Image: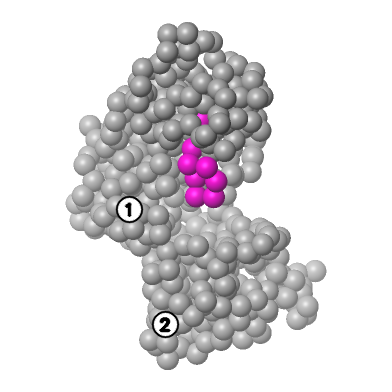
């Protein structure tokens, strides 16, 4: 394909020179280290680095031109194509280069503040039980036709997604389920992609360091349901949380299923029964009533299950397949995941890192009727500072004992982060300790726990690292907790 064909639909700042437009393109790339001769290089401005500084390196490696929304850097010695929006340009270029596989595949996008990962796992489980070869893209890991790959971003760059689409097609696959983050929507990573089904889980305060306001945050989420721009296609189906006030504001698709426990939901949960063994409830869909059983715990997971049911119904799958897959889908790593060494109290690890998510996970713990709930949490550095006291307030209001520690401090001082959180923690008289060393904090929390208690290690979930100011270290809450329990004499052996 030529540059002219590759950039079809892309908004250019100036017309392509005739000779440049007809050059043949061998591939696309946004990482100069992977550029090969004949490639078109896309240079993005980023939070940490400006991609333009690598443009000359890309040209030196054989790139025929660089594409950017910014002017060429001084001294650049190659062809420069200036566009209105760099990531949107890459998304359209990748769509053109790979022959628009999203039109042939069935894409399900799941967005919302909480529940995206579990919902995508559930949807993928139902599709696979139906005999469909699938791909899954999300926070924890990527799956492709049964192969598990490490996740780089919750939602990768558009070029990486189109490469994955091509691989899925080559493997005989037809359906891909993906978490679609607000960042990805705002930046244009899924720009121009045709989704068969779009799912909305909920919206609570998060990522305001990036979006600046809840209105901007919600506007980004709505781009999945009402995409904007040349070549954008609205989803055929939407599956929306009927009980969420933001969900009620989303413009419906030609086919919409609203789920929830409140009256008026198309998929309505009834007679919810919860314990530590899991969930049991009835879902009403029109004249049908179906009993669902799941090893997942907590009402918030009942919402995730209803969302997955809605997505499965959008593909015409039957209730027998849906209910069987739900019953056999295990818990997602780092989502209310138990660490069991035979101790007389429950230790769970959860990814909760917003005030609403903390309330949800503590609520799940309360539903199990513990003697006390002990919550350990921290707040991430280089992220929305305003949510720190809110997280602390949520933990202290709902818990019997709180341990405030570090999460991923990144470039910030951990003590300064905890001081921000302490404002909210001190609004209640909940007993608490403050320990910036997360390993020491976990040890202290376990020592505090007694028979019948539930200890929640919140914030990092499935993550196996901690991001410090000058390095990234290996750190897994599950490993640390298990090690402390063993040292204190508990063992399953």
Q: Position of residue 310 (x, y in %)?
A: 35, 42
Point 35% across, 35% down: residue: 197
Who comes first in sequence, dot 1 or dot 2?
1
Quarter of the figure with residue 308: top left
Q: Nearer the viewer, residue 121 or 23?
A: 23
Q: Is residue 320 left or right of residue 283?
A: right
Magenta range: 42-50
Q: Is residue 492 left or right of residue 107?
A: right
Q: Residue at x 75, y 81 (%)?
A: 488
Which secondary structure lies at badge 1? helix
49 part of magenta stretch: yes
In this view, 170 is above or below 262 = above
Identify the element where label 2 is drawn.
helix
User: What residue appears at the point 39 percent right and 48 percent down from the top-left corner?
Assistant: 182
Count of number-bearing discs? 2
Front one among 347 and 84: 84
Can residue 373 be spotted in the picture?
Answer: no
Whether 80 is drawn above or below 452: the answer is above
Residue where numbered disc 2 is placed = 423
What residue did someone put label 1 on? 217
Residue 195, given in percent of the width and then of the height, sits at 37, 31
Q: Quadrant of residue 272?
A: bottom left
Q: Position of residue 194 (x, y in %)?
A: 37, 28
**Residue at the front extreme?**
75
Outermost residue to the right = 493
Instruction: Specify whether residue 126 is painted magenta.
Output: no
Q: Is residue 206 visible?
A: yes
Q: Residue at x 48, y 24 (%)?
A: 80
Front position in the image: 339 or 478: 478
Disc 1 and disc 2: Cα gap in Å?
25 Å
Image quarter hosting the C terminus: bottom right
Label 2 packing within 10 angstroms: few (<14), some (14-19), many (20+):
some
């Amino acid at each position: 394909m030529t540059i002219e064909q590759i950039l079809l639909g892309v908004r250019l700042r100036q017309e392509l020179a005739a000779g440049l437009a007809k050059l043949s393109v061998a591939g696309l790339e946004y990482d100069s280290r992977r550029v090969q001769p004949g490639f078109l290089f896309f240079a993005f401005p980023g939070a940490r680095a400006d991609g333009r500084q690598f443009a000359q390196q890309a040209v030196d490696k054989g790139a025929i031109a660089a594409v950017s929304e910014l002017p060429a850097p001084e001294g650049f010695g190659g062809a420069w194509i200036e566009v209105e929006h760099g990531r949107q340009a890459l998304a359209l270029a990748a769509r053109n280069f790979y022959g628009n596989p999203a039109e042939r595949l069935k894409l399900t996008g799941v967005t919302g503040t909480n529940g995206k990962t579990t919902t995508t796992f559930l949807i993928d489980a139902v599709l696979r039980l139906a005999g469909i070869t699938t791909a899954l893209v999300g926070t924890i890991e990527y799956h492709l036709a049964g192969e598990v790959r490490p996740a780089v971003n919750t939602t990768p760059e558009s070029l990486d997604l189109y490469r994955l689409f091509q691989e899925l097609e080559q493997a005989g696959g037809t359906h891909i389920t993906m978490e679609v983050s607000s960042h990805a929507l705002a930046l244009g990573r899924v720009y121009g992609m045709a989704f068969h089904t779009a799912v909305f889980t909920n919206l609570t305060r998060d990522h305001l360091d990036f979006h600046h306001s809840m209105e901007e945050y919600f506007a980004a989420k709505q781009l999945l349901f009402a995409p904007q721009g040349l070549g954008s296609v609205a989803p055929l189906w939407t599956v929306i949380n009927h009980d969420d006030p933001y969900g009620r504001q989303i413009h419906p698709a030609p086919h919409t299923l609203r789920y929830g426990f409140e009256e008026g939901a198309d998929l309505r949960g009834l007679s919810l029964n919860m314990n530590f063994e899991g969930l049991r409830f009835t879902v009403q869909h029109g004249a049908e009533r179906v009993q669902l059983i799941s090893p997942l715990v907590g009402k918030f997971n009942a919402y995730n299950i209803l969302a997955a049911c809605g997505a499965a119904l959008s593909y015409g799958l039957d209730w027998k397949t849906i209910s069987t897959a739900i019953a056999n889908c295990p818990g997602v790593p780092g989502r209310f995941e138990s660490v069991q060494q035979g101790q007389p109290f429950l230790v769970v690890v959860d990814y909760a890192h917003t005030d609403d998510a903390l309330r949800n996970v503590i609520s799940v713990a309360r539903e199990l009727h513990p003697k006390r709930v002990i919550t350990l949490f921290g707040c991430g550095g280089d992220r929305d500072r305003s949510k720190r006291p809110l997280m602390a307030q949520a933990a202290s209001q709902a818990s019997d004992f709180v341990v405030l520690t570090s999460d991923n401090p990144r470039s910030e001082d951990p003590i300064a982060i905890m001081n921000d959180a302490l404002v909210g923690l001190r609004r209640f008289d909940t007993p608490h300790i403050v320990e910036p060393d997360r390993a020491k904090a976990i040890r202290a929390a376990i020592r505090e726990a007694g028979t019948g208690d539930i200890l929640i290690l919140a914030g990092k979930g499935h993550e196996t690292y901690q991001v410090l100011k000058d390095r990234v270290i290996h750190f897994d809450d599950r490993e640390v907790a298990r090690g402390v329990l063993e040292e204190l004499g508990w063992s399953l052996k």
